[in-house]
Amino acid sequence: MPQPNSTPAELIALFGARAGAEPLAANLLLVRHLKCKESLALAQMVSEAVDRHGGNNTPVLATPSELLPPLA
Amino acid sequence: MLEGLPTSYSHEFRAELLFDLCAALVREGLGTPGAWHKCGENPLVFAQRSMMAAIGEDRWNLLQRNVEYHLQISDVGDEDGYTKPLGNGLLALTIECSGSGFLKIGPAIEALERECKGLGAAFYWTLTYALYPVMRLYNHDDAFQYEERMREYAEEEDEGHKEQYEFPDVQKALPECFRETLSHDSRTSSLQARRLLSQNRGGTYRSWLEHLRRIERLSRLRLRATREFQTDGNYDSAPLPSLLVAFKEQDAVIACFDEESQYMLEGSAEPALAVLFSPTKPEEVREAVRIAGRFIALNCELCELIEELQEWEKSHASERVDWRESTLRAA
């Protein structure tokens, strides 16, 4: 790992090594997911289902009547 | 309980291009080992800070006060309205303008004319022709074209509907000394302008002429941005104007610009500057740095001139500058 006092050549070599390094497994998985239409469709469906059914603790309020009762 | 949980997530795709860019920045002397250490060894932050350091804080602030530019380096481009990877290890450096600068040049032209007949017009034309190759302007010429279009539309209307058209009288907005030069032969005028500017280089307004001389020198550098990026992008329009040049407050040029600018942001506009380069090819990186460097240096020189003229006008007239209402005018 280059130190603050390392040379530009050492830093360039470090970037070269990083550029040629194998991608992380998590990144490869993500790339596979983003390239797969079925996977993307499934993710969207799960996300929509969560929106509809998950964490739905907020009660739906009834629409108020056109004439609101006066505040007490 | 929440201690140790990750608070952010990032992923990289084609990260090798980012590391190649970082290496290129170091090769060009724009990024340093010290900077790499300071930014927590994050390649994205390193690339951003290295470019910002190359621009410099003062110049960055100067540009931000006068115009809205956005600099970006990306591995994707637009093709027929869709974002697509550039491929072949290429990156695109783009500068987009979303709010144009404003130069009220009338008072300066009049002052120069008082100093020496013909000097005001010479200043205007020389500045205009120096800026044309580098950036899109909105000036008297665009206003003339807008007026002509309006007159053509009115001609096509039935009798009785023609009255609904209002025409800006652009000719009237021009200073008299400048109006006279519109019909001159450009080659002769250019030689005369050069002679006049040279003769007055040591005069009262030498600082303005010095800015103009530096702008001209930067404009003459033989550098070409990448045209393919613009043509492949199928943009709806040319770049948005980086500068509005008018003669006085609320003149016909400003009126035309205000009308036209309402529609300028509707479609996609070409970037003000675009250059494709491969970060692994030092000569291409150097050329990209030179092209962007020239664009920034010329804009800074222009912004300095704009601010100097504003200061001069403040101390010579009570007229207040108020041009912030328009959609596109930035500063």
Image (tube, coloured by chain):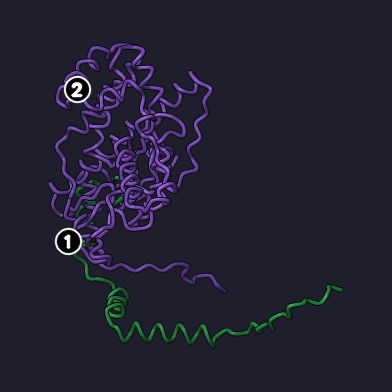
Chain colours: A green, B purple
Judged from the image, the secondary structure of the residue bearing numbered disc 1 is: loop
Q: Which residue is mark 1?
A: B89
Q: Position of residue B190 (x, y in %)?
A: 18, 24
Q: In x, y percent, where is residue A20?
A: 19, 64
Q: Looking at the picture, does residue B179 appear above or below residue B100? A: above
Q: Quadrant of the C terminus of chain B?
A: top left
Give me the disc on residue A63.
none
- In the rendered view of the protein, which quadrant contains the N terminus of chain B? bottom right
Amino acid type at image mark 1: Gly
Image quadrant in which you'd find residue B196: top left
Rendered image: mark on residue B189: 2
Q: As rendered, which of B100 and B183 lies closer to the eye? A: B183
Against B129, is B208 above or below? above
The Cα atoms of the two marked residues, 2 and 1, are separated by: 47 Å
Identify which residue is drawn at 22% across, 52% down: B23
**Same-chain check, marks 2 and 1:** yes
Q: Nearer the viewer, residue A29 or B239?
A: B239
